[in-house]
Amino acid sequence: MIGASGPAPAFGGVTVGDGAVIAAGSGRPAVRMQGVTAGYGARIALEAVDLEIGAGSLLAVIGPNGAGKSTLLKVIGGLLEPRSGTVEVLGGPPGAEARRVAYVPQAEAVDWQFPVTVEEVVMMGRIPRIGILRRPAAADHAAVADALATVNMTEASRRQIGALSGGQRRRVFLARAIASDPDVYLLDEPVTGVDATTQEDLMDVLEAEARQGKTVVATTHDLACAAHRFQQAVLINRRIVAAGPANLILDQRLLAETYGGHVLVVPGLPNGSVLLDDAHHHDESGGESHFHEELGR
Amino acid sequence: MTIVDLFVDPLAYGFMQRGLIAAVMVGTVCAVMGSYVVLKGLAFIGDAVSHAAFPGLVIAYLIGIPLYIGGAVAAVLTALAIGVVSRRGNLRFDTAVGVLFAGMFAFGILLFSTIRNYVADLFSYLLGNVLGISAADLVQIAVLGLVVLGVIVVLRKELLYATFDPAGAAASGLPVTTLEYLLLALLGITIVVSIQAVGIIMVVAMLVTPAATAQLIVVRFSRMTMLAVVIAVVSAVLGLYLSFYLNVASGASIVLVETVLFLVALVLSPRQGLLVRWSSRAA
């Protein structure tokens, strides 16, 4: 129950502090992190993170800017070596099962003027499978077509990516991930700056993937979306503040602890209340502001 | 005198034949490499590597080995050193590159100044002399150019993914770091191949301008590369003939033709041309 005037928060199934376990699906953890500390240069972005993510989880990673959300994804994806601690992904070190992992960067990390079409971007998801010197086979073209259909972007397949709206751009990158047929999705802000329809559509797709046993880990700034559409959530601010079922974890006290008081609670709406993150939307590495729909034509 | 004569007559000279072949080959390799340079933002690195190749050329001359080998060693080493600096330097990247290439270039000038009788040749290194290219040079350009093009053709899917989204490509298992170093090494080779034709100072234009022009016009990477090659070849031929008839420097002439084509595309491009933007704003 979320809300300023609601009853005392329920804590069943919620882990507060370190040693967070996100259990979902049938069993084996897809990701296991123990005492992980990571950062860039002199800056520590993640500290002493213990986290276990069960296969089949649909997990929202929530926290203020600079809380280490993107860093968490990069460590799991094998893009950033942790300073200390151990990380296990699909039973091996990060990167060992790279073809079974799909990583989607934040929209503003992408050069949208790059001369590639929608179809070409989605085909990139197949490249590690196709292998050097080979051309895409019929199965690869079929996988691309399926992925485009799944995110409802078939008609736009020959357009250059810069000509797409913000929502369409997120759809295309999710399609690329789907085309690679991964077991783990690592999505950095997949529903940031998109229209409501796109958000619902993308969440439907992710939900379906999780139901098939795929593990979905997505950072988000959208607390309402996290509460309503994700199964699990982990609150981080360098350290893990809490982890558990999304509807329980998005509790005012825990959020206040995560955001340091930067959470606005708006009571009186259906389902209790809506939480707004008033943190300015900034990339964790600093500088660029998030892409918003209205800028995308 | 017919149009055909205009093109055929200069070919009576052996230096024009060789110059034309060299300019077309260099233009082609630079245009293909240039597509990556433009999209990865490597123009400054390209300029740095071409200057840093200079001491390699001079040392090769001094100890009597083929110039291309000395230049290639210096260029590739510098390119790779820049790659290392970009990954783990504490300095700002452009500062580190600036220090590195200016120092290398100064070292080259210093060495060169010890060769009293050959100071006049300095200009042919700095500005290039495509009309002074020998048959042996042509063979070297062809071999090194084919190596560069061959590697790029073989790895084009992987290079495209790693260029477009290095993080996504690395997470999915592509050896992105290796591919980036490979690209830098190929850039070093491309630059050395081009120096004799267009000179240290203008190599960067051969790399950047045709690809930048093509990017204004087409929306697919493969077509961008092909169009860049067409632009480079047309510029090489046109520039060389202009230099022949107007009796002006050949390298500069080729680069200026490329620059004019870029400006035309900038104004007229149906995709992002200034004309389209102005008219859509007025509408």
Image: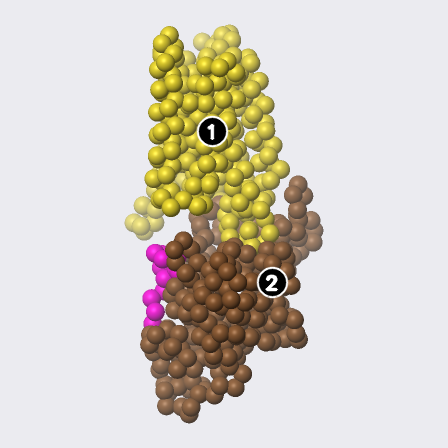
Chain colours: A brown, B yellow
Badge 2 amino acid: Val
Please determine if labels 1 and 2 lie on a single subunit: no
The part of the chain drawn in magenta is A278-290
Total numbered labels = 2
Residue at the left extreme of this rendering: B282
Residue drawn where x is 57% and y is 18% of the image = B139
Compared with residue A17, is residue A174 higher up or lower down, i.e. above or below?
A: above
Compared with residue A277, is residue B81 higher up or lower down, i.e. above or below?
A: above
Which SS class for mark 2? strand
Magenta residue check for A285: yes
Which of these two is toward me, B165 or B131?
A: B165
Residue drawn where x is 38% and y is 33% of the image = B100
Residue drawn where x is 57% and y is 22% of the image = B142
Circle 1 sits on which residue?
A: B75
Chief secondary structure of the magenta portion: loop
Give the side of residue A216 with respect to residue B61, left or right: right
Which of these two is toward me, B69 or A267?
A: B69
Give the side of residue A139 with respect to residue B95, left or right: right
List x then y, in percent, for residue A111.
44, 50
Which SS class for mark 1? helix
Label 1 chain ID: B
Circle 2 sits on which residue?
A: A89
